[in-house]
Image (cartoon, rainbow, N blue to C red):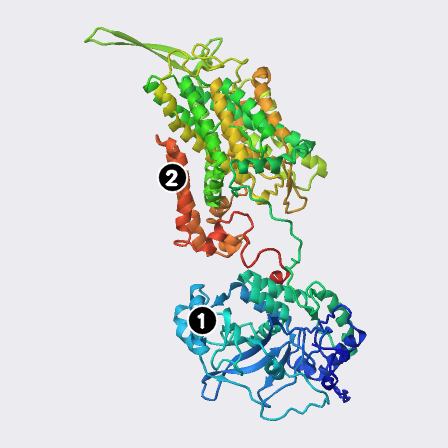
Amino acid sequence: MCVAEEHLPAERRPRGAKLQKTSRAPVRNTAECTSSRGQTAMAELSCELVNDVRGEVESYYARVTGGLRVGYFSCWTPSTPAALNVNCNANTTGNCLAYAELNELMKDQNQQGYWQETGRWVGYEENYDMEAGRWGPSHISYLTFKSIVQLRRTMNTGVVMLDREERSLSSIAEKIVDEMISKKEIRPGDREGLVQAFLQNRSQSVETQALSPPLEMQTFSVTERRDASDCVEASMVLVGALDFLEKPTVAFVRLKDAVVLESALEAPVPVRFIFVLVGPTKSDIDYHESGRVMAALLADKVFNQAAFQAQSDRELIDAMADFMDCSIVIPPTEIQNEAMLAPIIGFQKKLLQERLRPSDPQLRIDLKPRKSSIAKPLPPEDPLVRTGVPFGGMIRDLKRRYQHYVSDITDALNVQVLATVIFIYFAALSPAITFGGLLADKVDNMIGVSELMLSTAVLGVIFCLVAAQPVLVIGFSGPLLVFEEAFYAFCKAQEIEYIVGRVWVGVWLIIIVVVIVAAEGSFLVRFISRFTQEIFSILISLIFIYETFAKLIKIFKAHPLNRNYEQLNDTLEDPWHPVITHHTIQDNSTGNVTTVTVIRHRAYPNTALLSMCLMFGCFSIAYFLRIFKNGYFLPGKLRRLMGDFGVPIAIFLMVAVDINLEDTYTQKLVVPKGLQVSNPAMRGWLINPMGEHKPFPVWMMFACIVPAVLVFILIFLESQITTLIVSKPERKMVKGSGFHLDLLILVSLGGCAALFGMPWLSAATVRSVTHANALTVMSKGPKPEIEKVLEQRVSGVLVALLVGLSILMEPILKMIPMAALFGIFLYMGITSLSGIQLWDRILLLLIPKKYHPNEPYATKVKTNRMHMFTAIQMVCLAVLWMVKSSPFSLALPFILILTIPLRMFLTGRVFTEFEMKCLDADDAKVTFEEEPGVDMYSETRMPS
């Protein structure tokens, strides 16, 4: 600390400085100088004077160390008398002075190790000259930038122990070594050797002769300042090379109470901090320079106070970064004279204005939060955090999302939204018709295509208008189809009206969802990690892909490729009419005669081949235009327009091809005519809860809670997992989701729909992901990235309305070949695989390691461990597929839930926490504790 003379007592003022004119090498130091409010010009001149006086010593160190240097000092004017040349970087913890001592591991003539004191700090630095056997004059610390960055990086993975209660050096050493072993910083076999090294004898550096500098000036003395202070707390820095270690490792210890460690320091000073840096001799780290860096840090009052108050290693590393923010790097350029360094003083003052902030008459230092090198937005609100208030989560969803309601309408004024509406319309219509036909077959036509299309339309419009995440596409799904089949079989066996039983299941559904939402039960979704999400996502995608080829194979079986179609040689008006044969079977014992009628449909020539061409053609065109959108051909607007309308263009072209091939038959889309129920003889549009044709049993009204719980689990899992997938941070959605509100709306609408004999719906995973992908705006360039998603309500509303109006568009829709819609199914299944980490890792099984991507799961985890994790997920996927295809398919949601405890079991037993963080991070970009964000120092490439 340099102090203006006018503030010092007369007897403490320095004598005049008589500088000798000597030739000396350029000085490479850095001046950090700040002054308090009301600082006088004399104080600034004193700073320059001290800088000049220290030049001789600094020149020597600059010649010895060379290269890039960082130095610092501060200058301020105290309002009360102070000791001569007391650096303001000398920290006080409370009223105690901070003293730092550097000890290095040396070897004597007998190759016996001992600790040698080589430096000491009280703001300024003093070094011990081993050859001369004396202490050098005090000077400003000058540090290499490489050593600072190396030390900070090593601290990221080192051992940090705060508020320890040990009171002896031996117990501290044992705790440090044990912690290094537990963090796998050293091998267990190195324990004894490292403990022994810590407890080696210590040699204090004692003056053997007086220092005779060519400067006639009273110099600052670290020891005098230390001994003169009433309260001192020391920091002990130990550095050295140990050949039996594999890599450098550090330990930082803060004692709860400062204690005097016997024979640890030159003087019996209470120790607060202990820092250890040890490693092999052959290492890129310069242990001496790194030790000087840490000693200078602990002698800096801002860092020392931050280390005293730190609650975690993260705060400690942030304090190091704060120190680096206020340091100046001088390039390795020759400095002709000290005057060239004068501008640094003013520049450094500006840097320290944010770091040092006087808050009282004594100009005491207060800590300020570290400012990130890159401004970061506030983290988004977690929608799954419980409020502790009934319906608190739902109310928070309403407040979060409804403030964007106007933009949900205006954001739809985009041509990409129009293209998405056409695409998703066909993507939603085809499953509605397909599942409607399957459902009618399973439940004896009690519910069919008409009911499912009307349910998709009405529930879809209401949901998109009031939901918190309108990007979701709701529809019927495979698990719900399995439930309907099982519940119909149960009702038929019990001679209960199935359609009435669904009404009571709907009533219980509404009760269950109200209770769950009131208790904020959606918080359970946070236990569904990427491990489960991606297994479920790939399962749904594979179902779409499998069903596509299963339908194509079915066409090939119905219309096989024959060398000769005999019916074409007949002189019949309709050579493809079905062949009806009758077989008579007579029972000789009873005399009964049974007639069996067999209807055989004739195979159409070229139908299978044309269907295959239409399917793959529709898929290929849609997929090509999706890639073409980010290509280089044609103007950008035209290219993006074609990419946005890729699916409608593909369907239109396939319809045109099918129409022009008049002599080849293909199956067309079948759409019901008018708003008529599927089985008007057995039911109407309004279901009587007491029974349609006979009284409904009272006991069954209450027993329906069991199937209601099952339906709720199905809707809960599929809808919440879909919301998690759609709302992943990498999609860059900004308006938020509503797990509580959307669940309440979706299940309540399903419960009410049962009263009208319509099926309940859930969020359809593949259709929702496809909808989000279609609304995504990508950046331009060779590697396009997501810019934003057009989050709005209009596309979902229009799609639902078009599905409902399709009942009235039967003449137009019946021209679309089913094979073209199979191609859309295939397109949805394949495109929804993109962005799923599990799928990427499955592909890595076939890719050599040198071509693996630069992702944490591939670079920070061993390849065989990564493949093991992938194999476990693939086994889970195979089990789910087998359950889905078995008579026990009703248990599919329960098997899926079991993947959650499986993932918890794997963590810590099969895979470490670090490996799971890389393999199963919730975010696409893994964030580690030592890398909380983009940091200039972490990104700095280290010199080799």
What residue sits 57% from the left and 61% below the top? Answer: 315
Residue at the right extreme of this rendering: 41
User: Do labels 1 and 2 touch, CB within 8 Å?
Assistant: no
Spot occupied by residue 680 in the image (x, y as percentages of width and height): 46, 11
Query: Quick one: quadrant of the C terminus?
Result: bottom right
| Above/below status of 506 relative to 909 | above
What residue sits 76% from the left and 78% below the top? Answer: 48
Mark 1–mark 2 distance (CA, rounded to whole Å): 53 Å
Along the line of sight, which residue is nearer the eye, 460 or 821?
A: 460
Spot occupied by residue 637 in the image (x, y as percentages of width and height): 72, 36
Q: How many marks?
A: 2
Q: Residues within 10 Å of mark 2 (few under 14, many from 20)?
A: some
Circle 2 sits on which residue?
Answer: 879
Q: Going by the image, does 391 lie left or right of 1?
A: left
Circle 1 sits on which residue?
Answer: 166
Look at the numbered disc 2 and give the secondary structure of its residue.
helix
Q: Foreground mark, 1 or 2? A: 1
Q: Is there any visible trace of residue 249 in the rendered image?
A: no
Q: Amino acid at mark 2?
A: Val
What residue sits 39% from the left and 49% below the top? Answer: 905
Q: Amino acid at mark 1?
A: Glu
Look at the numbered disc 1 and give the secondary structure of its residue.
loop
| Above/below status of 84 relative to 943 | below
Kindly indicate the quadrant of the structure image that contains residue 142. Answer: bottom right
Sequence order check, earlier mark of 1 and 2:
1
Along the line of sight, which residue is nearer the eye, 299 or 921?
A: 299
